[in-house]
Image (tube, rainbow, N blue to C red):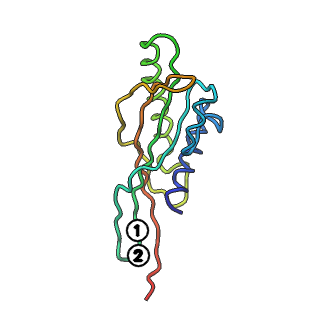
């Protein structure tokens, strides 16, 4: 497994929600913001938070961080946009919380949104976006073979 598999599993979980599908969830492809969508999620690699080795058997737990970029199209008044980010952020967090092992993904011990950035406005073409980045920590277990 590895980081890419965990990120792909997270994208699959997000797409299980009625508000998201292959047309507004991507892994690192920001071009989706120019496709006229009302909202979008873009996943990007974050830090390797930590790694722990357990001696018997030789198991490694890696905590991957995935940056979840939540983009809400700016429509009308700023008050409407800020209300959108509040409700859509909470809806996305509640949805991901329902899948603490990313819907049974192999080797995934847990996946939990641990924090996020302050919402801000991104100026795009042709849309302005209300943007917030959420940070999810995904713990993956792996067994390694000792050589030599």
Query: Looking at the rendered structure, which numbered label has been put on residue 28?
Result: none
Secondary structure, mark 1, is: strand
Asked if the residues shown at circle 1 and circle 2 are in contact, with their CB atoms under 8 angstroms apart, the answer is yes
In the displayed structure, 47 sits above or below 72; it is below
Image quarter hosting the N terminus: bottom right
In the displayed structure, 128 sits above or below 8; it is above
| 106 or 43, nearer to the observer | 43
Percent coordinates x, y for residue 17 in the rendering: 59, 34
In the displayed structure, 144 sits above or below 76; it is below
- Image quadrant in which you'd find residue 13: top right
Please indicate whether residue 3 sits to the left or right of residue 117 in the image.
right
The residue lying furthest to the top in this view is 77
**Residue at the image position 42 percent from the left and 45 percent from the top:** 136
Percent coordinates x, y for residue 85 in the rendering: 44, 24
The residue lying furthest to the front in this view is 125
Please indicate whether residue 43 sits to the left or right of residue 112 in the image.
right
**Label 1 packing within 10 angstroms: few (<14), some (14-19), many (20+):** some
The residue lying furthest to the bottom in this view is 148
| 7 or 131, nearer to the observer | 131
Residue underneath mark 1: 60
**Residue at the image position 55 percent from the left and 27 percent from the top:** 39
**Residue at the image position 34 percent from the left and 30 percent from the top:** 118
Image quarter hosting the C terminus: bottom left
Secondary structure, mark 2, is: loop
- Number of on-image labels: 2
**Residue at the image position 35 percent from the left and 55 percent from the top:** 49
Percent coordinates x, y for residue 62 in the rendering: 40, 61
**How far separated are the C-alphas under marks 1 and 2?**
7 Å
Residue underneath mark 2: 58
| 44 or 12, nearer to the observer | 44
Percent coordinates x, y for residue 147 in the rendering: 45, 85
């Amino acid at each position: 497994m590895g980081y890419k598999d965990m990120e792909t599993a997270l994208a699959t979980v997000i797409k299980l929600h009625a508000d998201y599908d292959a047309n507004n969830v991507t892994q690192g492809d920001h071009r989706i913001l120019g496709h006229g969508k009302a909202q979008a999620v873009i996943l990007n690699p974050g830090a390797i938070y930590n790694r722990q080795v357990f001696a018997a058997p030789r198991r490694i737990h890696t905590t991957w961080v995935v940056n979840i970029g939540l983009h809400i199209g700016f429509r009308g008044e700023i008050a409407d946009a800020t209300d959108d980010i509040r409700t859509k952020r909470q809806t996305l967090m509640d949805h991901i919380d329902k899948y603490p092992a990313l819907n049974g993904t192999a080797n995934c011990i847990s996946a939990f949104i641990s924090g996020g950035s302050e919402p801000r406005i991104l100026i795009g073409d042709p849309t302005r976006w209300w943007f917030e980045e959420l940070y999810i920590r995904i713990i993956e277990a792996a067994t390694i073979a000792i050589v030599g």
